[in-house]
Amino acid sequence: MTTVTVIRPRAEDVEGQPILRPLPSRECRSVGPFVFFDHMLETRYAPGTGMNIRQHPHIGLSTLTYLFEGELLHKDSLGSDQLVKAGDVSWMTAGGAIAHVERSPEALKASGFNLHGLQVWLASPKEQEQGPGHYSHHPAASLPVSDNLGVRIRLIAGSGFCLESPVPVLSPTLYAEIEMQTATTLLIPDEHQERAVYVLEGDAQLDGEPLEVRSLAILPAGQSIALFAETDCHVVIFGGAPLDGPRRINWNFVASDPLLIDQARRRWAAGDWPTVPGESERIELPGSKA
């Protein structure tokens, strides 16, 4: 059995939405360009309630939101105003300064709904950290799918498994949702140097050793590894090329240079930041007075 690093995520809460966060961790700071991984746990919102992540800033990263169930409304300081449904990709590149809002649509809140999904952050290459912001929405039908011998692969972003996603990633990236029927096997190739497997549901094995559900397994470089489904399984596989240097994460800011983070903190605290049209509420800098 090839040795893998297993990370057990910590439980967090984001504006009332329970999550599991395996990345970043003490054991691993990044996998390819991925520096942050949130599993938004299956949550039932009663009628009249919902998720409301108020206006907040980002630099130096791209956020990717992908839902298994439910819907979210994305708004940002570029003027984007987009309903994101289950299976869609919501992709936002922050560049030097962007602000956005994510909340449950009013139509869903009226009746009550379930929410379940993932949000990840991908660090931008150094030469694009302070570039222009960008937003794009990719409907579920636009994402490539392979369905063969009981293994269904949907490529969320990047390239892998002979598929390529339309999401405009900034560096070599792999991000795939995998659904496996009982007793099926998927060979995870070594086409990307850094790779990880996150088990959403089901009993699985890597090269014959069991994987814990809702755990993150960091795979060794340069080896193809067999993923076997003991039961019906739902997993994601992600990674890509190593980052072009270490990244610092402070609140919602990601940068290769700590001075960029200090500058961003001062600007947000002072109100010197692009704003989301029609939005007045915002999340204040931790430790500052509103």
Image (tube, helix red, strand yellow):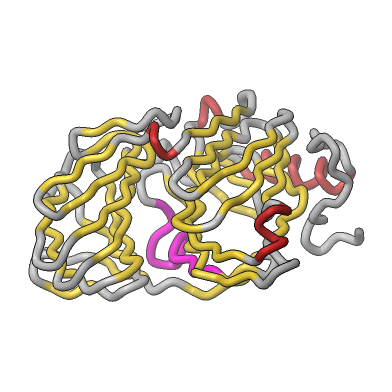
> Is 256 in front, or is 72?
72
> Is 204 in front, or is 222?
204
> Is 24 in front, or is 166?
166
Say above or below: 29 vs 25. Answer: above
Q: Residue at x 63, y 70 (%)?
A: 45
**26 in the magenta segment:** yes
Q: Quadrant of the C terminus?
A: bottom right
Q: Residue at x 41, y 52 (%)?
A: 30
Left or right of 80 in this view: 248: left
Say above or below: 159 vs 220. Answer: above
Q: Residue at x 38, y 38 (%)?
A: 157
Left or right of 263 in this view: 269: right
**Numbered marks: total:** 0
**252 in the magenta segment:** no
Residue 11, percent from left and from top: 53, 75
Residue 54, percent from left and from top: 76, 53
Left or right of 257 in this view: 270: right
Residue 12, percent from left and from top: 58, 72
Q: Quadrant of residue 201?
A: bottom left
Say above or below: 96 vs 40. Answer: above
Q: Residue at x 35, y 32 (%)?
A: 165
Farthest residue to the front: give it.
Answer: 111
Q: Quadrant of residue 135?
A: top right
Range of magenta residues = 19-30
Q: Quadrant of the N terminus?
A: bottom left
